[in-house]
């Protein structure tokens, strides 16, 4: 009940400060601020918050799939262009990651580091880290965490969630700012 109360207060404050369209982003910002300022209290709410979040996520999935028949026809029609776009997106993104990794490794090797320093420097750009970071950047926190968990890279699950949600937070406020700017 305390978790629900914190969420309700954050939503109410978000509406009061940002209006109806700013309620969700500001409530999210206030909730993150709460977890940063009161980590012990937030930790005690994590179990009930996870349960409430899972229930709401299932509700979202159920309602998002409700008009499924009309969407199925549009997906069939758009499969080729969307598939081509995603192939290009992941192909270019993956190529940039591979090139960036090779540049970082070659630059660090040229500096003449000791063997133990070289190994620790290579751990910065391990392929597993790059794959999870790439997934967080393109697919969001859910896909990145699923990728890390499926491959048993358990130490990368939390960073995947953090990076993906940070991306959502920044992009949400950037999108609202662009909308506000271009609307007028």
Image: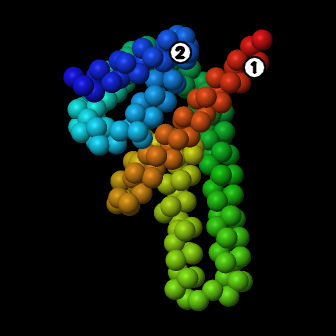
Residue 72 visible, this angle: no
Percent position of residue 173, x then y: 61, 28
Query: Which residue is depicted at the point 29% across and 20% down?
Result: 5
Query: Which residue is depicted at the point 53% across and 65% down?
Result: 127
Give how far apart the Cα atoms at labels 1 and 2 are.
Answer: 19 Å
Q: Any mark on residue 181, and which? A: 1
Rate crowding at label 1 as few (under 14), some (14 to 19) or many (20 or more) other CA atoms within 10 Å. few
Looking at the rendered structure, the secondary structure element under dot 1 is: helix
Above or below: residue 27 compared with residue 104:
above
Name the residue that disc number 2 marks.
17
**Image quadrant of residue 1?**
top left
Rate crowding at label 2 as few (under 14), some (14 to 19) or many (20 or more) other CA atoms within 10 Å. few
| Along the viewing direction, whichever of 179 and 88 lies nearer the viewer | 179
| Along the viewing direction, whichever of 125 and 85 lies nearer the viewer | 125
Q: Is residue 114 left or right of residue 179?
A: left
Looking at the rendered structure, the secondary structure element under dot 2 is: helix
Q: Is residue 30 left or right of residue 181?
A: left
**Image quadrant of residue 21?**
top right
| Along the viewing direction, whichever of 135 and 70 lies nearer the viewer | 135
Query: Which residue is depicted at the point 67% across and 70% down?
Result: 104
Q: Is residue 22 left or right of residue 13?
A: right
Total numbered badges shown on the rendered structure: 2
Q: Residue furthest front?
A: 37
Above or below: residue 89 compared with residue 25:
below
**Image quadrant of residue 113?**
bottom right
Residue 96 visible, this angle: yes
Above or below: residue 38 compared with residue 27:
below
Percent position of residue 129, x then y: 50, 61
Q: Earlier in the sequence, mark 1 or mark 2?
A: 2
Above or below: residue 16 compared with residue 36:
above
């Amino acid at each position: 009940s305390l978790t629900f109360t914190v969420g309700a207060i954050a939503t109410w404050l978000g509406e009061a400060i940002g209006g109806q369209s700013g309620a969700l982003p500001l409530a999210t910002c206030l909730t993150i601020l709460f977890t940063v300022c009161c980590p012990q209290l937030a930790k005690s709410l994590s179990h009930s918050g996870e349960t409430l979040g899972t229930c709401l996520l299932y509700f979202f999935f159920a309602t998002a799939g409700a008009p499924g028949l009309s969407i199925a026809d549009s997906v069939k029609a758009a499969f080729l262009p969307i598939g081509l776009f995603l192939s290009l997106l992941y192909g270019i993104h993956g190529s940039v990651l591979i090139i960036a990794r090779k540049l970082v490794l070659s630059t660090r090797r040229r500096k003449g580091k000791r063997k133990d320093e070289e190994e620790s420097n290579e751990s910065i750009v391990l392929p597993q880290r790059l794959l999870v970071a790439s997934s967080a950047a393109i697919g969001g926190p859910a896909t990145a965490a699923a990728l890390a968990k499926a491959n048993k890279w358990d130490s990368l699950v939390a960073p995947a969630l953090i990076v993906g949600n940070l991306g959502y937070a920044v992009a949400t406020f950037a999108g609202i700012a662009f909308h506000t700017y271009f609307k007028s």
